[in-house]
Image: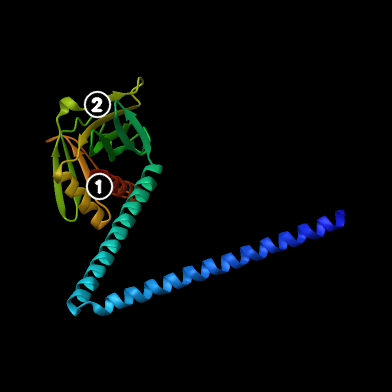
Amino acid sequence: MKKTYIIAGAVIFYVIIMAAGVAAYFYFDAQQKAQQEQVQAEAAVQQQKSPEELQREAEKATEEELRRQEEEHSRAVRENKKKKERELKDAMREETINGITYYKYKWPKKPEPGVYVRPFVISGNGRAVLAYDIYYYYHISDPQQTAWINGDHLQIMAGEETTTVTLDPAKMNKHMASDAEWLVESYSLQADKQVLAAFKRMLSVGGGYIVYYHAGGKSRQHALSSVEVKRIREMMELYELLAEE
């Protein structure tokens, strides 16, 4: 009796499988026929269109493709800019104070005696600014023996052109070691159009000089190293990227 039930169940299961297969066959066959009919109908409609209509459709398709390509290009440009921005920031120190972010490189407090230009970027409140420090460091063992310069001018020389920046000594930062072994004079300034142009000339020729001096008094000249030029370039690039946002 049990064997009869098993055989009957198997037969029923087989019938169900066969029925499902037949149904699937007819379903997909109907779908295929419907698609073929739709293609034929669209082809018939196309044949009924005038040359002017076909031309307009072709022009529209071309416009849509050009728009798609332009959007793709714009997206790629944005992504490349974001990637470049991340790469630049990764090599810098980032500090945010009261909603304003400063991007700087780590410079030595006690470099070789001389004068240096150290650019940095300030970003906040929807705008970006390129700024720079003038940093004069003197050590008692310095053979030039310039000590206090109290500079009131900075010259940036590059590409056979000289840009002169007038400094306000009242805004100078001064510091001297307790044993008078070394001293520092420094200024922090925003790069105006003339300084930006001077930096760009410096980058275009791959180098330049700066002269820090007091009118009618002492002075100190410095040729920028390849590292300094590279850092000016990178700060300029970051400034331009943030200014576009």
Q: Is residue 134 among what the camera can see? A: no
Count of marks placed on residues: 2
Specify the quadrant of the image occupied by residue 194: top left
Q: Position of residue 63 (x, y in %)?
A: 23, 66
User: Label 2 neighbourhood size at 10 Å, few (<14), some (14-19), many (20+)?
Assistant: few
Task: Give SS at disc 1.
Answer: helix
Q: Position of residue 153 (x, y in %)?
A: 15, 37
Q: Residue at x 19, y 30 (%)?
A: 150
Specify the quadrant of the image occupied by residue 77: bottom left
Amino acid type at circle 1 is Glu
Q: Which residue is outermost to the front?
A: 1
Amino acid type at circle 2 is Asn
Specify the quadrant of the image occupied by residue 243: top left
Q: Please, is residue 217 above or below residue 56 in the view?
A: above
> Residue 22: which disc?
none
User: Label 1 neighbourhood size at 10 Å, few (<14), some (14-19), many (20+)?
Assistant: some
Q: Residue at x 21, y 27 (%)?
A: 172
Q: Is residue 120 among what the camera can see? A: yes
Q: Residue at x 25, y 53 (%)?
A: 203
Query: Could you tell me how far apart the alpha carbons at marks 2 and 1 are, in whole angstroms?
Result: 28 Å
Pick the residue in front: 196 or 45: 45
Mark 2, residue position: 173
Mark 1, residue position: 240
Task: Give SS at disc 2.
Answer: strand
Pick the residue in front: 15 or 80: 15
